[in-house]
Image (spheres, rainbow, N blue to C red):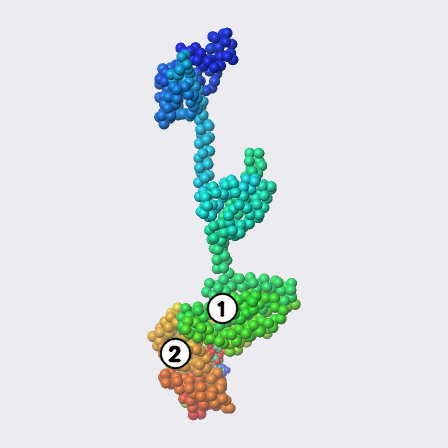
Amino acid sequence: MVGQDPPDAADAADAVTVTVADAADAADPIAVAERYRLLAEATRDVVMLSRPGHTEWISPSVTDLLGYRPEDLYDAELSLLIHPDDRATTLAQRADVAQGRAVEGRVRLRHKDGTWHWFEGRGQPVPEPDGGYSGRVVSTWRLVDEEVATVDRLARREALLRVILDSSPDVIVRYGRDLRIDYANQRIAEVTGRPPDSFLGKANRDLPFDGYDAIRWDLHLTRVLESGDPDAFDFEGDLGSGERAYEVRLVPEADAAGQVSHVVVQCRDVTDRRQAEEQLELAATHDPLTGLANRALLLDEIDRSLKADERSARTTAVLMIDLDHFKYVNDSLGHQVGDDLLRRAARRLEDHVRGGDLVARHGGDEFVVVMRSLEDPAEAVRVAERLVAAFRRPLVVGDAELFATASIGIASNRPGRRDRRGADDLLREADTAMYVAKQEGRDRLSLFSDDLRVVASERLRLESELRPALGRGELVLWYQPEIDLLTGRLLAVESLLRWHHPSGRLYVAGEFIEVAEESGLILEIGRWVLAEACAQAARWDEVVPERPLTVRVNLSALQLSDGALLADVDAALTAAGLDPRRLCVEITETALLRDLAAVEQNLRGLRARGIGVAVDDFGTGYASLTYLRQFPVDVLKLDRSFVAGLTDGADERERRLVAGIIALAHRLEIPVTAEGVETDEQARRLRDLGCRSAQGFWCSAAVPPADIEAILLGAPTGCATSG
Ligand code: C2E
Ligand code: CA
Ligand code: CA
């Protein structure tokens, strides 16, 4: 610092001493002035004696703080260093000083380098010798940049916190150690309809909420205050927005000494989330159409029940329920009606099971009832009987009454024994039993037994063996003659699958075709059958060109609704070079009813090619006649169950039924072929009823192609057509 005295330094020192001189040595005025000058020079703040427009003395520290030397500032108008925004206040203060009033405040001053700095100033008016005031003032200026910055930072932080707190979707409340609220955010107003302020100073027991458990809240608060650990709980109640679910979190807030001084409580409305979670849970475990448990939940429940049985020695029974003829309803009346029917069926099931039984939709038209903790396994049979009876009554859908009887399979674990089977096993067994119920004529129940267990595993084995059979050339086609009942001539042949099983046994189609259909293998096998049957017809033509035979090929329902069917047929015919009119496909009525659009397209495509269409097993399906009116077919193959009734001593009604069917077919101008003709008598009666042709053991079972070739070459057919 320049140790140079400003001109008026002595004056200034004089003035400053007015009040403090008593403390110094009054006897030595120079020493006193020097002492004060030293003091003023030593301070880190700026000390200044001035009057408006004139600086009389300023401490050297000004150089450190503002970059100017003191002499630069004498006679300068210091207000030029004041920030324009602060000038107005400073001017006002000058007036105060001129009135003899002390002033203080914060202003920004410009450093010589052009930067602005915050100073806290205090101005003490200096009286003139006459005791009046003229604006002369002693002022001190302290640099407060850091303080201002800190305050600013804090203010900004607080504003930010307030925005965060007030915009929080959660109600946030702070409690002091006295368990009274000392802060509540804006959100509380939206939730309760009361302003945040109205909560201040309140204890939980003062809060105006219905059914609000103040004691429980206090308990949680106290726990946090005492332990210093966060806490949480759920509560449901009406805080003014109706009954809602809240998740409450309590967090301790410590003071500077590390003591828990407050508890901050965050109260989150989780009603919507809970509902969404419940819906998700419901969707994951329930069937949307019927609202019943879905397969996933079903498996869980069965497994859980089986586990419980291990401890209690009770029984779990599984009822597999399949609606008979459902496909027919669905396909002919539309999916809307089908859906309604399923919903009705679901309700009927629920109405007829016991209270604790689980009803689930297993898929399609299959339902499952799980009966848990049975003391008496026969109870399952009783419930199943009740269900079968219940489903004999029509289901009302819209204004229609639909009949859908039920076939039920029952399986249960073996009580009292270690039974390692799981839900899957039980379901499979119930399914097998249900399948047997269907086979036995539907509208009934069947119990899974050890015999059925064998059947079930047999089926599984068969499927695994059938899979590679085609590739290994184990499958062959045999042909069953169809004979003209009047002339005994060979009219056509039906190709029937045979399987040279690795065991050496020959399996007939009836023993494995279902497995092929259920596993989907039938598509691949069916494609091969078409190609092989066409090729065989062409081979016979080579040997006996003058006797072109019609070859009938069985199509499974799956094939008939397969988009690739026509391409497969074309490929088979082209490869064999066979006239399409020599081919006739046999389809069942049920297959006709499967997926109308795809089936119809395939049928039209077949007819357009001149390929014949025969309806197989005629008389066993549904709605057959309505369909026949819609779609022309070439041959009806009367099911052998009708033919079986044509024996001596048989019911006369049976005979009349067959007569009726044949007459009806003739009225529709469709020829009838009788299937399963085993005796001369049946053949004769059929002929008498006007049936033109027949096939069956009476004449010949299915035989290898060479035997057909022999017949074509003149060998006898083996049937006695004395007519
Ligand atoms: P289906 O079309 O009704 O065939 C007639 C079945 O009755 C054949 O059994 C045949 O051997 C048998 N059968 C013939 N005459 C008589 C008789 O006088 N009395 C008795 N009791 N039975 C007789 P198979 O060969 O076991 O075939 C069973 C079913 O398998 C067939 O019934 C047919 O629906 C299906 N099938 C056979 N081959 C094929 C095929 O290549 N593809 C498809 N999708 N199904 C086939
Ligand atoms: Ca057939
Ligand atoms: Ca048949």
Marker count (numbered) = 2
Specify the label residue 626 is tagged with. 2
What x and y, as percent, mark residue 296? 52, 62
Specify the label residue 324 is tagged with. none
Work out whether mark 1 precedes mark 2 in sequence or the reverse, and give the earlier one.
1
**Occupied quadrant, residue 705:** bottom left
| Residue under the image location 40 percent in, 25 percent down | 107
Task: Say which element carries label 1.
Answer: helix
**Occupied quadrant, residue 223:** top right
Out of 112 and 267, give the one closest to the viewer: 267
Q: Is residue 653 left or right of residue 602?
A: right
Q: Is mark 2 within 8 Å of ligand 3?
A: no
Out of 637 and 375, give the one closest to the viewer: 375
Query: For the residue marked with disc 1, what is the amino acid?
Result: Ala
What x and y, as percent, mark residue 204? 54, 45
Q: Of the residues tagged 1 and 2, which is closer to the observer? A: 1
**Does residue 433 appear anywhere in the picture?**
no
Query: For the residue marked with disc 2, what is the amino acid?
Result: Thr
Residue at the far right: name it. Answer: 416
